[in-house]
Image (tube, helix red, strand yellow):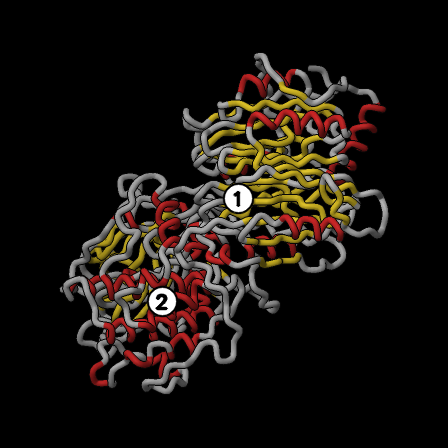
């Protein structure tokens, strides 16, 4: 198909774009069911977008430009692309489409969002003996569940890259080591190997009289090969973190570092057994007193680390080590492995909290202990270390976590889903009350919230025994000025109660989204059976309305029809096939573009295609999971998400060129992502597409290329269909842009006829709400 060069056509297209951006997607319906948001039983909660300062502040993209590693699509995932089309001709009435057709388009190149893809590393291999900050010889031999080890990301050194080692392709470590101004060490037995290098015992060749410190006769030597992924940009990123934290309470000292031959070398204190080793040596259990001591000391260590501006990113039993047996520090706790540490606070004088972001294809940490936010790809902050600590403590006390045992490629998804579905009551049912209180507190924290470390420590006061009975030293907690006794501080005595976001019980809810727009005529129907759909569409067409959005609930349909879509013609198909490929491609040949889609739980779908859109090319994908990697790839090619839907657990996503958007982001969650949406609002984004399965909800938020006005957007959550709220918002010129919700059984029709005027009241006349 040729590209028109007519100047009038280009002018018309620009007018269509402006019209569409002003009026498009006034109302979008999508079903969201069985999400574990306990607040669905309440009557309503309203959330309003904050006032924006002048201009739009966009989120900072921290991703490095790396090679696109998107895998080929599985055979059960359908990807279909429309040809590039410039010219549009013809008008027509809405009606059913039919027939067959085929069109294959050529992908284009364009500017988009850079990609960081997961690069799953091989599991860490931890051998018996001492480690960096390692396990002392003679310590308990760990029984590792290798499937649970760290999954690391690929990216720039400032984001920390996993240094996957391959002994078959790297040179052997040197027999002797001397870096910087260090003494000379003989490299002896190997202590461990993992994603961030190899660790050996180094014995000083001459001198050395101490057990720890720069004059120690035995040290831990950590080697990372210069060709490993973590050293692509020079010395390992971990070096920067140790330099910033050296001397930080609970972090082992790094005495020397430098490069020798093909290796970067760290010279560190050698430590004793890990909490994993101790847990195994005690018969895979620990007393409440011991775990409480671990809790208060670990909180204190994390407080000091956080005060330096870093989060650890991989808190787990294997990364907490005790001092060497027989030394004064044998009961002292240390936190090791800073390879996944990142800044929660900007370096320099500003000291501002890093910006919120979510990249669902990035995961950092260890699956068993990672926070739900880490599973979802959100920027790490202080709350994530504390949530991982909560899982660590419960594991040490109970001996098992409910999400152990999952296998397969979607293990991370299944584990994170189980974490969200497991309430603190259930997870801590055999734990003393302080552990439940700790878990509830840290899982309800906001992204940039400063933890009240003193109050968290005080939760465990009642479990701490006298000093001579303590198996772990709690120097950090004592120095923090805590009154060690049976004093339990009420966390709510000077704080507002918080909503509990993880109660573990599934619920249905309606989520409605409202935009402040110029008044126009709008009509919607819901709970419409297949047989009655056609008559509603025909009646709307006769009244000058076109479908702007469709959805399904309990295999019944909802549709919204607007007078201000800018469409000139429309066709639709109700098919037992989810996103019927042949029909869609035939309509593409006829210059129609997908403008709305909906899927039902029985696998059928409703596809609406229109003329008069600004789109020049489309592509869509059907996938068994949310296709974020494909979306990311298409962003780079200049496409943006313009429609989404689901059918059961299957996702259907439509992306278009010339959509009128400059930037897009995704908020993906098991619940309504309230905090993430508010963060995006503050940066100038607006919800433009949404869809949900029974497990997950996805929201696409966009920034338009052309800012027409400072558009207000609100969301509301209710336990029933928000009929009254919709009408009230009509009276305020807030038109419903999206409704995501539960189900009713009676077919309903509601209409808003809004003349262009500044004032008006809601008059419940026959046929709906009129103004």
Which of the two discs, 1 and 2, sits closer to the camera?
Answer: 1
Near mark 1 (Cα within 10 A), the count class, few <14, some 14-19 or many ≥20, is: many
* Relative to 295, residue 542 above or below: above
Residue 727 at x, y percent in the picture: 70, 49
Residue sitting at x 40%, y 73% = 247
Mark linked to residue 677: none
In the foreground, 349 or 460: 460
Residue 87 at x, y percent in the picture: 74, 19
State which quadrant residue 141 falls in.
bottom left
Task: Report whether residue 270 is seen.
Answer: no
* Relative to 367, residue 453 above or below: below
Q: Which residue is mark 1?
A: 698
- Identify the element where label 1 is drawn: strand
In the foreground, 432 or 122: 432
Q: Which residue is mark 2?
A: 254
Residue sitting at x 63%, y 25% = 534
State which quadrant residue 294 falls in.
bottom left
Which quarter shows the N terminus?
Answer: top right
- Identify the element where label 2 is drawn: strand
Residue sitting at x 66%, y 44% = 737
Task: Report whether residue 24 is seen.
Answer: yes
In the foreground, 552 or 80: 552
Residue 14 at x, y percent in the picture: 79, 32
Residue sitting at x 73%, y 27% = 541
Q: Earlier in the sequence, mark 1 or mark 2?
A: 2
């Amino acid at each position: 198909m040729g590209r028109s060069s007519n100047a009038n056509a280009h002018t018309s297209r620009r007018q269509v774009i402006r019209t569409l951006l002003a009026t498009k997607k006034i109302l979008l319906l999508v079903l969201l069911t069985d999400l574990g948001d306990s607040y669905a039983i309440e009557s309503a909660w309203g959330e309003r977008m904050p006032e924006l300062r002048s201009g739009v502040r966009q989120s900072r993209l921290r991703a490095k430009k790396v090679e696109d590693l998107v895998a080929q699509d599985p055979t059960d995932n359908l990807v279909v692309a429309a040809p590039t089309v410039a010219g549009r001709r013809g008008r027509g009435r809405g009606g059913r489409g039919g027939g067959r057709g085929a069109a294959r388009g050529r992908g284009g190149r364009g500017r988009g969002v850079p990609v960081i893809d997961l690069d799953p590393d091989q599991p860490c291999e931890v051998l018996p003996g001492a480690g960096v900050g390692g396990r002392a010889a003679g310590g308990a031999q760990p029984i590792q569940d290798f499937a649970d080890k760290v999954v690391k990301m690929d990216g720039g050194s400032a984001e920390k890259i996993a240094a996957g080692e391959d002994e078959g392709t790297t040179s052997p470590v040197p027999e002797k080591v001397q870096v910087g101004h260090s003494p000379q060490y003989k490299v002896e037995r190997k202590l461990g190997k993992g994603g961030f290098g190899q660790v050996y015992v180094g014995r000083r060749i001459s001198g050395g009289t101490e057990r720890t410190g720069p004059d120690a006769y035995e040290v831990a030597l950590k080697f990372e090969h210069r060709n490993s992924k973590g050293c692509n940009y020079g010395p390992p990123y971990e070096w920067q973190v140790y330099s910033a934290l050296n001397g930080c309470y609970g972090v082992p000292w790094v005495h020397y570092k430098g490069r020798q031959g093909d290796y970067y070398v760290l010279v560190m204190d050698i430590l004793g057994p890990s909490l994993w080793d101790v847990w195994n040596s005690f018969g895979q259990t620990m007393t409440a007193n011991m775990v409480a001591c671990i809790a208060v000391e670990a909180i204190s260590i994390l407080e000091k680390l956080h005060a330096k501006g870093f989060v650890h990113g991989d808190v787990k039993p294997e990364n907490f080590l005790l001092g060497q047996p027989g030394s004064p520090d044998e009961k002292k706790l240390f936190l090791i492995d800073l390879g996944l540490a990142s800044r929660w606070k900007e370096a320099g004088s500003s000291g501002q909290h890093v910006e919120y972001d979510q990249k669902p294809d990035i995961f950092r940490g260890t699956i068993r202990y990672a926070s739900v936010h880490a599973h979802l790809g959100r920027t790490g902050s202080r709350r994530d270390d504390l949530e991982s600590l909560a899982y660590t403590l419960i594991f040490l006390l109970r001996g098992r976590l409910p999400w152990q045992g999952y296998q397969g490629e979607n293990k991370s998804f299944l584990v994170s889903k189980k974490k969200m579905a497991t309430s603190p009551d259930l997870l801590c049912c055999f734990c003393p009350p302080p552990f439940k209180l700790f878990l509830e507190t840290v899982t309800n924290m906001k992204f940039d919230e400063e933890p009240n470390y003193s109050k968290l420590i005080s939760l465990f006061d009642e479990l701490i025994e006298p000093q001579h009975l303590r198996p772990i030293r709690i120097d950090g907690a004592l120095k923090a000025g805590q009154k060690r006794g049976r004093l339990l501080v009420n966390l709510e005595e000077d704080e507002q109660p918080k909503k509990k976001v993880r109660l573990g019980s599934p619920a249905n809810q309606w989520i409605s989204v409202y935009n402040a727009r110029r008044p126009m005529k709008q009509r919607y129907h819901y709970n419409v059976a297949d047989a009655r759909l056609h008559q509603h569409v025909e009646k709307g067409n006769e009244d000058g309305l076109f479908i702007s959005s469709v959805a399904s609930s309990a295999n019944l349909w909802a549709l919204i029809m607007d007078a201000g879509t800018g469409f000139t013609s429309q066709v639709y198909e109700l098919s037992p096939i989810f996103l019927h490929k042949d029909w869609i491609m035939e309509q593409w040949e006829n210059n129609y573009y997908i403008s709305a889609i909906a899927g039902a739980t029985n696998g059928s779908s409703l596809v609406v295609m229109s003329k008069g859109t600004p789109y020049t090319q489309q592509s869509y994908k059907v996938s068994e999971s949310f296709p974020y990697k494909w979306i990311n790839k298409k962003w780079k090619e200049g496409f943006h998400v313009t429609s989404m839907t689901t059918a059961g657990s299957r996702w259907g996503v439509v992306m278009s060129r010339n959509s009128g958007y400059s930037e897009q982001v995704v908020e993906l969650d098991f619940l309504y992502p309230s905090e993430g949406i508010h963060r995006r609002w503050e940066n100038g984004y607006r919800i433009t597409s949404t869809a949900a399965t029974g497990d997950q909800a996805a929201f696409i938020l966009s920034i338009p290329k052309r800012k027409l006005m400072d558009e207000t957007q609100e969301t509301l959550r209710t336990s029933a269909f928000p009929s009254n709220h919709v009408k009230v918002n009509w009276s305020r010129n807030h038109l419903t842009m999206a409704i995501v919700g539960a189900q009713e059984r009676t077919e309903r029709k509601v209409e808003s006829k809004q003349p262009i005027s500044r004032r008006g009241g809601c008059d419940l006349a026959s046929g709906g709400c009129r103004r």
